[in-house]
Image (tube, rainbow, N blue to C red):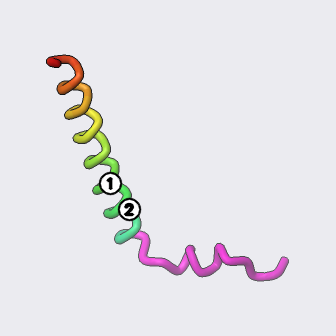
């Protein structure tokens, strides 16, 4: 089994990747809730 591009991703700083993932996840919830509240009150 030869080395694939996944080897580079495994070496990436996991804490930073998880931090960005959580950041955008929270932003997505906030935007979704904001749109939902806007549509519910309009």
- The residue closer to the viewer here, 1 or 32, is 32
Residue at image position (32%, 63%) is 19
Q: Which residues are magenta?
A: 1-14
- Quarter holding residue 35: top left
- Quarter holding residue 30: top left
Residue lying at the far right of the rendered structure: 1
Residue at image position (56%, 74%) is 10
**9 relative to 22, above or below:** below
Residue lying at the far front of the rendered structure: 42
Q: Give the structural element (helix, strand or loop) at label 1.
A: helix
Residue 6 is labelled as none
Name the side, left or right, on which 5 lies relative to 32: right
Q: Which residue is mark 2?
A: 18
**30 relative to 22, above or below:** above
- Crowd around label 2: few <14 · some 14–19 · many ≥20 (10 Å): few
- Residue 24 in the image: state x and y as whole percent: 32, 54
Q: Give the structural element (helix, strand or loop) at label 2.
A: helix
- Crowd around label 1: few <14 · some 14–19 · many ≥20 (10 Å): few
Name the side, left or right, on which 6 lies relative to 20: right
Q: Measure the alpha-carbon separation of dots 2 and 1.
A: 10 Å
Q: Name which of mark 2 and mark 1 comes first in the sequence.
A: 2
Question: Magenta span has 29?
Answer: no
Name the side, left or right, on which 27 lies relative to 7: left
Total number of numbered discs in the rendering? 2
The quadrant in which the C terminus is found is top left
Q: Which residue is mark 1?
A: 24
Residue at image position (59%, 81%) is 8
The quadrant in which the N terminus is found is bottom right
């Amino acid at each position: 089994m030869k080395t694939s591009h996944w080897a580079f991703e495994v070496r990436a700083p996991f804490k930073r990747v998880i931090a960005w993932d959580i950041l955008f996840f929270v932003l997505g919830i906030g935007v979704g809730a904001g749109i939902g509240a806007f549509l519910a009150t309009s």
